Amino acid sequence: VNHVMASEEEKKSVFDVESAKEVVKELRASFAAGKTKSYEWRSTQLNAMLKMMEENEPQIVAALRDDLSKPELESSIYEVAMVKSSCRVALKKLKHWIMPEKAKTSLITFPSSAEIVSEPLGVVLVISAWNYPFLLSLDPVIGAIAAGNAVVLKPSEIAPATSLLLARLAADYLDRSCIKVVEGAVPETSALLEQKWDKILYTGNGRVARIVMAAAAKHLTPVVLELGGKCPVIVDSDINLQVATRRIIAGKWGCNNGQACISPDYIITTKSYAQKLVDSFKCELERFYGKNPFESKDLSRIVNSNHFARLSKLLDEDKVSGKIVHGGERDEANLRIAPTILLDVPQDSLIMTEEIFGPLLPIIQVDKLEDSFDVINSSGTKPLAAYLFTNNKKLKEKFVATVSAGGLVVNDTTVHLAEHTLPFGGVGDSGMGAYHGKFSFDTFSHKKAVLYRGFACDAFVRYPPYSRGKLRL
Ligand code: NAD
């Protein structure tokens, strides 16, 4: 049952380049009038968003059920509570963030004082993805508002119920002259990308990121690209196996059934430990999702038939036949794939060269755990997140020193996302720029350098006629 349906009028509206131009024009006028700059406007909008989330949780959960069969608890925690928490953090800290930051000055400009003023960039665009469609849409918008910008949000068409609900709620709760939701797919996004923005934050895959960056380059618009990749998990043998297994399951199948950018993509462990790990997964998976995971209400479905076909292709490749050691069942009609574990798949298989973004988890075996770092680094791409389970201090140090990734977590998975004191973003192929907490505010601000001088101590050495003699004075 679709809980959120578009009205005939909503279906008919066409959004083209002219419409995009109009939207930007209106927002530019609002920004130029100074509407978004005051503390009052920013805090009013953040409070309104908080209220919007508080008053509409059942509708939000229902939309996420329509789009992804997302379990209610996952929706409540990862989408609603996290957006509310971001609003609260911004509201609590905003006065402090807005304040100019004093900077030291040197003899060169003596006497002087200096400060760094955080200035809104102007009119910004947020393009978001379907997997956490509320969080990934609103979290960047919170940063854009806190920093005093006008903003257009383009949610993903692949989560249509959420997209429609976001458009309606934003229009009802937020200042429409400064914050707009534009729904649509490639044509609508392309029309938006033709316009001049002061910053674009894009969340999604690397192929489209290149389109976004090329469009931005035409206007010299800076971009934040929140992308994905293959997030590895290294598992040592000196650990609490049950806790480790559960935390990997929570980050994989417990995060939208593996359709999360920081979900564990594959595991690396030693040949001598792999079977123990597989047995532990079997045991805990059954405990969490029962003997028949298709009957479990606690697993999201695969978002659509394209992604179902993409994941099926990874499983059906000849190279991986016979490698499934757990799960593997598929129900195409209901877009369900059981939690699946594969052991010893070849490095050049599709499942090891493409981002999985679903409920399949290959386990790679190495002779010595230290070899894991070579496996990760030899891929030539930098993951969005990497995880290590160990009690070995030396291994932890080597992990932090040698693995380049957006973020690292030792002895857990995915939870770094919830710490607003940490920047969230990728490096290399997993993206550029970061947000969350103060980093969101900074991402959508220009740090303006301001130096104040008086008229005393006018160093004449800089004035012509130039002479070495003056320097010696
Ligand atoms: P998607 O299909 O929803 O696309 C993302 C956005 O790009 C959508 O708004 C879509 O309308 C737009 N888009 C698609 N094609 C376009 C085109 N040709 N021109 C302009 N815009 C276009 O999402 P996706 O790409 O399937 O998302 C999954 C990917 O995103 C994975 O790689 C995942 O790791 C990554 N991801 C990253 C984060 C993060 O925070 N770093 C979060 C979620 C997902």
Image (cartoon, helix red, strand yellow):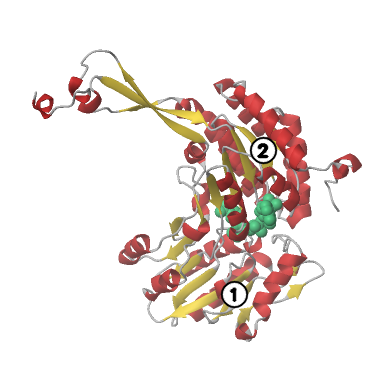
Per the model, the C-alpha gap separating discs 2 and 1 is: 36 Å
Number of residues whose C-alpha sits closer than 10 Å to that of mark 1, classed few (under 14), some (14–19) or many (20 or more)? many
Q: Is residue 165 left or right of residue 328?
A: right
Q: Secondary structure at mark 2?
A: strand
Quick one: 13 or 344, which is closer to the camera? Answer: 13
Q: How many marks?
A: 2
- Residue drawn at x 47%, y 46% as measured from the top left: 423
Q: Which mark is residue 152?
A: 2
Q: Give how far across and how far down residue 312 sits, in percent.
A: 70, 74
Q: Give how far across and how far down residue 457 sits, in percent.
A: 20, 16
Q: Is residue 339 left or right of residue 14?
A: left
Name the residue at the front extreme: 465
The residue mark sitting in front, 2 or 1, is 2
- Work out which quarter of the rendered image holds the C terminus and state it: top left
Pick whichever of labels 2 and 1 is earlier in the sequence.
2
Q: Which mark is residue 351?
A: 1
Q: Amino acid at mark 2?
A: Val
Q: Secondary structure at mark 1?
A: helix
Q: Which mark is residue 339?
A: none
- Asked if the residue at label 1 sits under 8 Å from ligand 1, the reply is no
- Residue drawn at x 52%, y 50% as measured from the top left: 417
Report ligand 1 position as a quadrant. Answer: bottom right
Q: Amino acid at mark 1?
A: Ile
